[in-house]
Amino acid sequence: MQLFVETSWGSRQTFSIRVKADGSNTIKNIKDLIHAYDGTNLLQQWLLSPKQSLCRGIKEETLAKYGIQAGSTIHMAEVVIAHGLRLNSLTKSP
């Protein structure tokens, strides 16, 4: 199965990742693949589908739970940790 990941910073980079063809693949597996591709720390990855947020932490929830299918696009916002505060890259500037 092929998924597309679109980032929310800069030029809205999009890349594809290949995962196991069944819905038993987990969000953590996807985060591991993203980390291998671009180096973004697992705890800083905030994954979103068009319908909902895909758990912020590192969890073993499956793609099937979120209805993610072959050809789906997952959006990734990078959570920035500064001085103990968690801010995400989708937060509007004042």
Image (cartoon, helix red, strand yellow):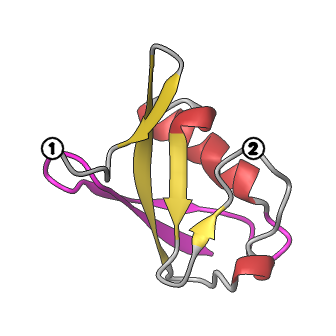
Q: Is residue 56 above or below residue 26?
A: above
Crowding at dot 1, Cα within 10 Å, few <14 / some 14-19 / many 20+, comes out as: few
Q: Which mark is residue 6?
A: none
Q: What range is drawn magenta here? A: 1-25
Q: Which mark is residue 58?
A: 2
Find the distance from the CA under tag 2 to the CA under tag 1: 30 Å
The image quarter in which residue 38 lies = top left
Residue at image point 73% right, 72% down: 63
Q: Is residue 29 above or below residue 38?
A: below
Residue at image point 47% right, 82% down: 50
Q: Residue furthest top?
A: 83
Residue at image point 62% right, 34% down: 43
Q: Amino acid at mark 1?
A: Pro
Q: Relative to residue 80, is residue 36 drawn left or right? A: right
Q: Label 1's element?
A: loop
Q: Is residue 14 above or below residue 11?
A: below
Q: Is residue 22 visible?
A: no
The image quarter in which residue 8 lies = bottom left
User: Which of the marked residues, 2 or 1, is nearer the chain's N terminus?
Assistant: 2
Q: Amino acid at mark 2?
A: Ile
State the image coordinates of residue 53 (x, y, percent, origin top left). Answer: 58, 68
The image quarter in which residue 22 lies = bottom right
Q: Label 2's element?
A: loop
- The N terminus, quarter of image: bottom right
The residue to which callout 1 is attached is 94
Q: Is residue 7 visible?
A: yes
- For discs 2 and 1, the disc positioned in front in the rendered view: 1
Residue at image point 64% right, 54% down: 30
